[in-house]
Image: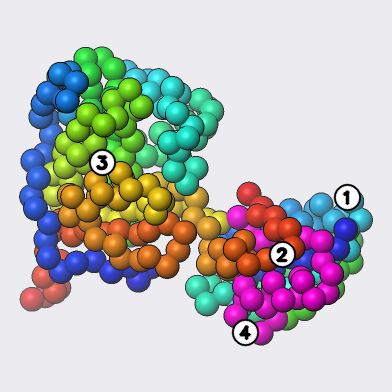
Amino acid sequence: MSDRTFSDAVADPYDAPPLSFTDREDRTIEVRAYDGSDEEMEALVEMYDAFDPSDRAQGIPPGREDRIRDWLENILDEDCLNVIAWDGGEVAGHATLVPDGDAYELAIFVHQTYQRAGIGTRLIKALLGYGRVSGVEKVWLTVERWNRAAVGLYQTVGFETSDAESFELEMTIRLAEPPDDEGG
Amino acid sequence: MKVLLGIGGSDDSIRALEKTVERTANVDDDLTVAIVDNPSVERSREDIETRVTELLDERGVEATVRLLDGDAGSALVDLAENEGFDQLVLGGGETSPMGKIQIGSIAEFVLLNSHVTVTLVR
């Protein structure tokens, strides 16, 4: 298990999905938890299949449909928390928490057509809100240090840099107080 | 080709060992396996050495096995540069629960410092 450091302070309690808002391009965006259906999975496959490869991060999303499906099957598992931003029937963005020991690893992707419209901030807040109401205590992520937009987004919602020694920055956030000592 | 494989015992370094021995069996490279100290790995040096010799015997591949002391990255780069190796081979990283590729600290150092061609095995 890693010796990742987390803040002692609990981050702002964001609202859990479902919620909706109007983005900067006047599109109505709905944010909902993944419902477990094949239809929503197929909509995600479609978004990732059309995803600009230059926006890949550390090998995800993968670049071929069969690999996209394998990857999605892992992260859409019941143990994981997934939130999707919808523009009607089309996926604008997707954010996910994948369990890793006593914490969760976070990733977020917004399709190129929907970037720079304020969707990422709403989507990640909704995911953190969903995590909070689902009992998630700690969340971590890695981000390429040149990706200033992403680093800025994570800082805005309360992530702090926990490891700056590697190629990628590692950032962490605490969503809940640690559980009381056993037997206490 | 004179190939130096660095192995510290992480899962990706074991995978690199398997693929490199396989390749050596096919192309007749001159292989040296350097066992280094990776502080983030629990596997002992003896375990790693046993795994290396077993695999070499199994595949009928001849290779020099060496133990390197001190900081793994700089020891590998030194050896590769000073003894005329053509290529330095390392494990290509682990994947996070999310599926993100994470390059190990030895590979990071070697990539940024080696004047010898580096291969990361995936």
Instruction: Report crowding for label 1: few under 14, some 14 to 19, many 20 or more residues within 10 A (C-alpha).
Output: few
Which label is found at residue A171? none
Q: What residue type is labelled 4?
A: Gly
Which chain is indicated by disc 4? B
Which label is found at residue B26? 1
Query: In 3D space, how far apart are the residues under numbered discs 4 and 1 (Cα atoms)?
Result: 33 Å
Choose mark 4 or mark 1, whichever is in front: 4
- For the view shown, which residue lies furthest in the top direction? A89
Q: Examine the structure image and report whether residue B70 is included in the region drawn in magenta.
A: yes
Q: Mark 2 points at which residue?
A: B115
Residues A122 and A182: in front is A122
Magenta segment range? B68-92
Q: Where is residue B4 in the image (x, y as percent from the top left)?
A: 77, 66
Q: Which amino acid does label 3 sit on?
A: Leu
Badge 3 marks a residue whose secondary structure is strand
Query: In 3D space, how far apart are the residues under numbered discs 1 and 2 (Cα atoms)?
Result: 26 Å
Q: Position of residue B39 (x, y in %)?
A: 52, 77
Q: Where is residue B61 in the image (x, y as percent from the top left)?
A: 88, 62
Query: In 3D space, how far apart are the residues under numbered discs 3 and 4 (Cα atoms)?
Result: 43 Å
Question: For the C terminus of chain A, which image quadrant?
Answer: bottom left
x 64%, y 76%: residue: B74
Which chain is indicated by disc 1? B
